[in-house]
Image (cartoon, rainbow, N blue to C red):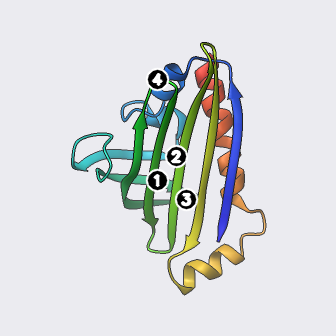
Amino acid sequence: MVHWNEQRVIHAPIDKVWALFLDDRLQTIMPQLKKHQLIEGPPNQVGSKYAQQNQMGNRLVSYVMEITAYEDLPNGKRKDLSFVAGGLFKISLSFNLSKISDEETLFVYSGSNTGANLAGRALLKLDPNDSSREQAKELVERVRTKAES
């Protein structure tokens, strides 16, 4: 199992940062996401499900992503997601925003990647560069760059 927890102070209002996580803007911070389509429930509600396709290396992986927690308050925002990618990896993600001031937001991106079966667990052990953590750092930087521009 791989865990990550990346934090960054972003010099932008909380609502501007949160807007990057809306369905129609998600691909601006996740360019590997090739498809994001609501298939069950209302948008941005706990239990809502989305069909997604994600470019992982030279493979296009399809899966169903579910929102497991959602909060949109003036001083704090949260969206938790869960999905199984390629039948191999159970991935849980959490995006948390906390208002520091009118022009500063604390962004915390945490998550885990667990092998969903023996093959998935073996593949995680063979990842010498810990690519999940590196991808988390890259996402946090993309969010910062887009929100501060």
- Closer to the N terminus: mark 4 or mark 1? 1
The span from disc 2 to disc 3 (Cα, nearest Å) is 11 Å
Q: Residue at x 40, y 32 (%)?
A: 22
Q: Mark 4, mark 1: which one is toward the viewer?
A: 4
CB atoms of marks 4 and 3 within 8 Å? no
Q: Mark 4, mark 3: which one is toward the viewer?
A: 4
Q: Mark 3 belongs to which amino acid? A: Asn
Q: What kind of element bears circle 2?
A: loop
Q: Mark 1 belongs to which amino acid? A: Asn
The percent coordinates of residue 53 (x first, y second) are: 40, 53
Q: Which residue is mark 3?
A: 58
Q: Which residue is mark 4?
A: 74
Q: Mark 2, mark 4: which one is toward the viewer?
A: 4
Q: What kind of element bears circle 1?
A: strand
- Closer to the N terminus: mark 2 or mark 1? 2
Judging depth in this view, the residue of 52 and 12 nearest the camera is 12
Judging depth in this view, the residue of 74 and 30 nearest the camera is 74
Q: Mark 4 belongs to which amino acid? A: Pro
Q: Residue at x 59, y 62 (%)?
A: 112
Task: Please tell me whether residue 119 is drawn above or below residue 57 in the rendered image.
Answer: below
The percent coordinates of residue 19 (x first, y second) are: 45, 25
Q: Which residue is mark 1?
A: 54
